[in-house]
Amino acid sequence: MNAFILSLRDQKFGGAVTSGVLYKALPYWDVWWNDRLPDFKLLTRGQRLTVLLHGYNNGLDEGREKLVRFIGWLEQKGSTDLMLAVLWPGDSWTNALGTWAGALSYPSESRGADDSADNLLTWLVLHVDESARVAFVGHSLGCRVVMRAAQRMVRDVTVKKPILDRICLMAAAIDSDSLGRDEPISYRDAAMQADRIAVLASQEDRVLQAAYRVGDSIQSWWPFSGERSLRALGRYGPEGGPPEVLAKIESHMANPGRGIGHSDYLPQYPLPVPPQNQTTADSEQFVFEFLTRLPKPNWPAESP
């Protein structure tokens, strides 16, 4: 497995955002690599590094299991990218009490996502070679981490840095118009600079229908939050924006008959019996074809 794990966590549930610790991912355990950061940088020279982020309400073990299995499925399809699974504290200690208890903390997690994005960007600039291309694959609130990191990479970083490649956003818990606007909590600079952006969305996503609307409306009451919309990109697809931005985006909407929900884009956790060999949304098929630059990447969930 050509994969590494960057943990920005200091606890299994909740906790602070850290500067990051690197591990080499193996199928059932991970090997400490934080003392080999120069070696990692050499590995990225002239390569593409695909950075994957889980979404909201994932504890440490759950986030690791989902991303490592997803990487394994991409490799089975033929991916040769160097992979980096990023574990970030997009949850609360209440997650230890169960899914619905953890969901109550959603409105407070945008700050954790932004802090994670800032620390991830710092780590990438320090430890990824400037000749490398960096692609991002994000799910749910992890898409906010992705887009803030990408936005700041192209707008704010003035030192030598990796090249922004493609971005795939799955069930994105960001505003539906945020890719085309030039405002706080918007990402037009990243959208313009990225090679291409793919959006996978489903109108059957009940989590985004309910929790995103509630969370975003609560956050909009907070001073300087920058929140505006109650419509999530991962449910409605991209809305609005200048033609030059829209030309960079390919949007894919799941067929309603498939009933694709919020958690269907990544592997199930815990591992079901019998075990899965693909996600419910077949998202790994699209991600593989999109990142390998097939002219018309196929997302099977668009079909009945």
Image (cartoon, grey):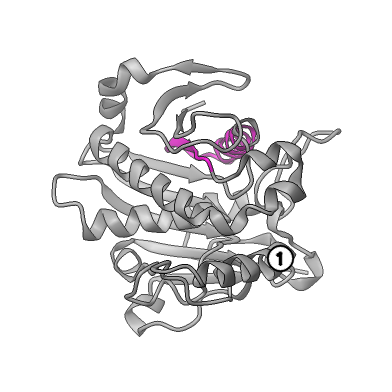
Residue 293 visible from this viewpoint? no
- Tell me the residue at 52%/74% (across/down): 176
Task: Determine whether the residue tagged by mark 1 lies in a helix, strand or loop.
Answer: loop
Q: Position of residue 179 (x, y in %)?
A: 41, 71
Res 218 visible: yes
- Magenta-colored stretch includes residue 80: yes
Residue in the image at 64% along x and 46% along y: 57
Q: Residue furthest right?
A: 273
Identify the residue at image location x=36%, y=33%: 19
Left or right relative to 88: residue 301: right
Work out whether residue 94 or residue 271 is closer to the camera in this orientation and state it: 94
- Look at the picture and state if 228 lies above or below 268: below
Decide whether residue 247 is among the magenta residues. Answer: no
Q: State the image coordinates of residue 98 (x, y, percent, origin top left).
A: 76, 42
Considering depth in this image, is 217 or 25 the residue closer to the camera? 217
Q: Nearer the viewer, residue 74 or 54?
A: 54
Image side of residue 23 versus residue 12, left or right: left
Whether 46 is drawn above or below 299: the answer is above
- Give the residues in magenta: 63-89
Image quadrant in which the C terminus is located: bottom right
Q: Position of residue 295 (x, y in %)?
A: 47, 64
Amino acid on which the number 1 mark rests in the picture: Asp
Identified at 55% across, 62% down, the residue is: 172
Q: Quadrant of residue 156?
A: bottom left
